[in-house]
Each structure stands twice: as C-alpha cells, then as structure tokens.
Image (cartoon, grey):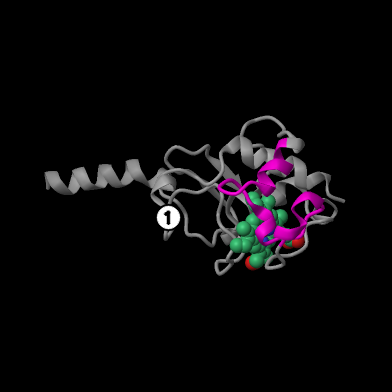
Amino acid sequence: MRLTRLLAAAALLLAPTLVPPAFAQNAEVREPGLVPYVVKDYAIEKSLTGKPGDAAKGRQWAITGGQGNCVICHKMPIPEVAFRIGNVGPDLSEVGGRLTPAEIRMRIVNSKLLNEETIMPAYYRVSGLTRVAPAFANKPMLSAEQVEDLVAYLSTLK
Ligand code: HEC
C-alpha cells in the first residue's frame, strides 16, 4: 500500500519532466540541463536564450567541425569551405526566405520532430541519442547560444 502510494507520487512528480515521443508536433520539451522549449506547428517560437543570436558567429558554427559543421551536408554560401560542402541535405542558400526563424530553430534543435528518420543530428537534445561520443554524453551538440547564432545566420540567407 505504502509502496503503491510512493510510486504514484513518483509518477506524478516525473510526469511533467518526461520527454514526449520524438514525433510530437505540439509539446513542451524538458530535458535535464537544457532550456525548456515549446514546439508548436513544427516551430519553436521563442529564442532559447531569450534574445537574438549573432549571425556572424552562426556562420562560424556552420563551418566548424565539432560544433555545427552544417556544411558537410548542406550547401551554404560560404566560399572559403567550398571544398567541404556536401549535398546530403537541402541547399540552405535561401532557407531564410523559405522558413521562419521559429521553423529554422526547430529544425536545428531536433529535426527528428519533423522526420523521425532524418540523418540530420538533433543539435539541442540529450536524451534518445545513440552512438554518442563520450565527450557529448549528457551535453547537447550545440549550446542554446550557438543554436540562436545559427538561427540568426540562416535567417539572413534569402
Ligand atoms: C548529416 C547531415 C546533416 C548535417 C550535419 C546537418 N543537416 Fe540539416 N538537414 C539534413 C537533411 C538530410 C535534411 C532534410 C530533412 C530531412 O531529412 O527530413 C536537413 C534539413 C535541414 C533544414 C530544413 C531545410 C529545408 O529547406 O526544409 C535546416 C534549416 C537545416 N537542415 C539546418 C542545418 C544546420 C543549421 C546544420 C548545422 C548545425 C545542419 N542542418 C546539419 C542533413 C544534415
């Protein structure tokens, strides 16, 4: 009896912190150590840091190995790394005209919310990851600031 009540209490406590299934169109996502965020209509409206990012830094993360390194899969207008540019993902040269900043943010945070099968890494996520290098255990691949810097940069691409 006591145990049942204890378990019920634990379940109640844990319930709001449970991460919703990867395929969630509308959800509030809370993960240990990460800023909570709300996904609505495949977009995250609010800045993870509460302020706009720095587009110049975002451009840098897009080409930095170990950080974003987006150019290994995406065409972007960054001539100095032309030799490293991949075409696994869609061309992002005009992504700011196609997607809103909120939609871009969701795709960087966790594009698996849109397509469970995508090979694009979920950059702001700590749970449900497989084959994580020890250096990344319990750490998202990008910080909230870096995500916002990338949102700012990609939004300039029109
Ligand atoms: C391993 C390859 C890979 C890497 C690395 C990668 N992406 Fe992607 N990305 C994809 C693929 C593939 C898609 C297409 C969506 C899908 O698979 O459902 C995509 C889609 C996107 C989209 C949506 C584009 C659209 O037109 O709908 C954005 C925005 C995006 N990626 C941004 C980024 C950013 C920013 C980075 C770096 C932080 C990044 N991606 C790194 C593979 C990658």
Provide the residue designation for mark 1.
Answer: 132
Question: Could you tell me residue 88's position as x and y percent?
Answer: 68, 68
> Where is 103 relative to 51, above or below?
below
Residue type, label 1: Val
Compared across the picture, whether 83 is left or right of 138 comes to: right
Q: Is residue 41 magenta?
A: no
- Between 14 and 55, which is closer to the camera in this rendering? 55
> Where is 87 relative to 152, above or below?
below
Quarter, ligand 1: bottom right
Question: Could you tell me residue 102's position as x and y percent?
Answer: 71, 46
Q: Which residue sits furthest top? A: 51
Q: In the image, what residue occupies the spot 42% across and 40% down? A: 32
Compared across the picture, whether 2 is left or right of 107 comes to: left
Compared across the picture, whether 145 is left or right of 158 comes to: left
Question: Could you tell me residue 50's position as x and y percent?
Answer: 65, 30
- Between 77 and 20, which is closer to the camera in this rendering? 77
Q: In the image, what residue occupies the spot 84% across and 55% down? A: 94
Q: In the image, what residue occupies the spot 55% across and 66% down? A: 116
- Between 52 and 131, which is closer to the camera in this rendering? 131
What's the magenta region? 57-85
> Where is 97 relative to 37, above or below?
below
Total label count? 1
Question: Could you tell me residue 135's position as x and y percent?
Answer: 42, 45
Q: In the image, what residue occupies the spot 64% across and 46% down? A: 64
Residue 40 seen in the figure: no
